[in-house]
Amino acid sequence: MPEKKERSGLRRPRRIGDMTMAGPTQRPSTQDEVNYSVWSGRQGVARYGAAKGWIDSSEGVILPKLVSEYAGGAVLDLGVGGGRTIGLASRAAGAFVAIDYVPELVQVARQRFPGVDIRVGDARRLDFAPESFDLVLFSINGIDAVSHTDRGAVLREVRRVLLPGGTFYFSTHNRSGPGPRERPWGPPPVTMRHPRSSVLSLLRRVWRFPVNVANYRRLRTLTELGPGWRVTTSGAHDFGIVIHYTTAAAAVAELREAGFAGPIRLWDDVYGTELSGDDPRLDGCWYFHVVARRDP
Ligand SMILES: C[S@@+](CC[C@H](N)C(=O)[O-])C[C@H]1O[C@@H](n2cnc3c(N)ncnc32)[C@H](O)[C@@H]1O
C-alpha cells in the first residue's frame, strides 16, 4: 500500500513550478506560493538536502554557546530543510525535534539523519504544547519566507512553546542593509572572507542574467512596505524568492509585541561580531542574527 502523504497544518500552497525557470508572463499569486515553490522545487531540495557546516562565523559563535547552555534540554529546529543544523543543534540536547513545511525536504533530512524526530509542520501553527522547549531556532533567515502578518504568528507561536528561561535564535534579512536594493544588474553579496563562493556567485549572476531579470520583473509586483520592514525580491535563488526585510529596531519591537521580555542580542552576518541595534556597521549587513530571551 502506498505510504500516506504527510501534510503540514496549513493548506499546502499551490505549486507554480520551478520559479528559477519561470518566464516573465507567469504571475505569482502570493509570497507564500512563490517561496514554497522554491524550497520544494528540484533545485531547492538538492541545495538544502546537501547543505552542511556553519552558515557564517556568527552562527558558529552563537549556536555552540546556546547548545552548551541548554545541554540536556529540549530543542526545536524550525525550517530544518535538509537537516544542516541537526548535527550542530542536537549534539547535547535531551530531546530534539525538527520541522519543515516541505515534505520533500523532511524526507531528505530523515534519510540523512535516521532516528531523529523530523516532522512536517508549519512554524505559523506549531503542533506542540505550551512551554515545551528550552531552545528554538529558525536558521538561514527561514522566518523571512512568510508574510509580515504570518511573521507575527511565528513569533507568538515560538513564544508560546518556549519554557520559562527559554531562548529563540534566528537570523533575518536586514531592511537597512544592501539586500532590498539588490538588482539583477548589480553585484551579488561578495566577501574576501569566502573568495571561492564569492567568485561563483559573481559568475552565476552573469550566466543567469536573463532568468534573474525575468524573475525580478515578475516578482517585484509583490513588494509591500511597512514601518521598519519591507517585503520584496531577493537575489537568492536567481531572484526567485520574495522575502521579509526588517530593521533591527523593528525586529526588537515585533519580538516585544510577541511577548519576548528578556534581553535581545544582535550579531553581524559574517564575522561573529555582536552589535548594538544602532551600530552603523549593521548597514553593511545583508542579514543579522538575533538571540531573544523569553524572560528578563
Ligand atoms: C533558507 S532554508 C534553510 C534550511 C535549513 N534550516 C538550513 O539551515 O540549511 C529555509 C527553510 O525554512 C523552511 N520554511 C520556510 N517557512 C516555513 C514555515 N512557515 N514553516 C516551516 N518551515 C518553513 C523552508 O522550507 C526551508 O527549508
Image (tube, rainbow, N blue to C red):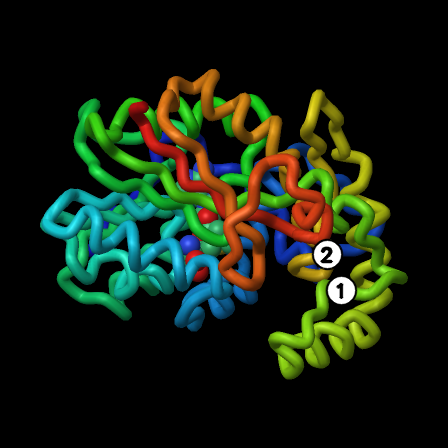
Q: Determine whether the residue tagged by mark 1 lies in a helix, strand or loop.
A: loop
Q: Along the line of sight, which residue is nearer the eye, 252 or 27?
A: 252
- Reading the chain from its start, which is encountered first: label 1 or label 2? 1
Label for residue 287?
none
**Residue 186's image quarter?**
bottom right
- Note whether residue 88 is visible: yes
Q: Residue at x 37, y 21 (%)?
A: 261
Amino acid type at mark 1: Pro
Categorize mark 1 by other alpha carbons within 10 Å: few (<14), some (14-19), many (20+). many
Categorize mark 2 by other alpha carbons within 10 Å: few (<14), some (14-19), many (20+). many
Q: Along the line of sight, which residue is nearer the eye, 31 or 173?
A: 173
Q: Is mark 1 within 8 Å of ligand 1?
A: no
Label 1 sits on residue: 188
User: Residue 232 in the image: x percent, y percent?
Assistant: 73, 39
Q: Along the line of sight, which residue is nearer the eye, 14 or 45?
A: 45
Check whether the beta carbons of the residues at disc 1 and disc 2 lie within 8 A of each other: yes
Q: Which of pointers 1 and 2 indicates the residue nearer the eye?
A: 1
- Note whether residue 101 is visible: no
In this rendering, would 256 be left or right of 27? left
Give the distance between the C-alpha atoms of the residues marked 1 and 2, in whole angstroms.
Answer: 7 Å
**Residue 59's image quarter?**
bottom left
Give the vertical position of 121 relative to 39 (above or below). above
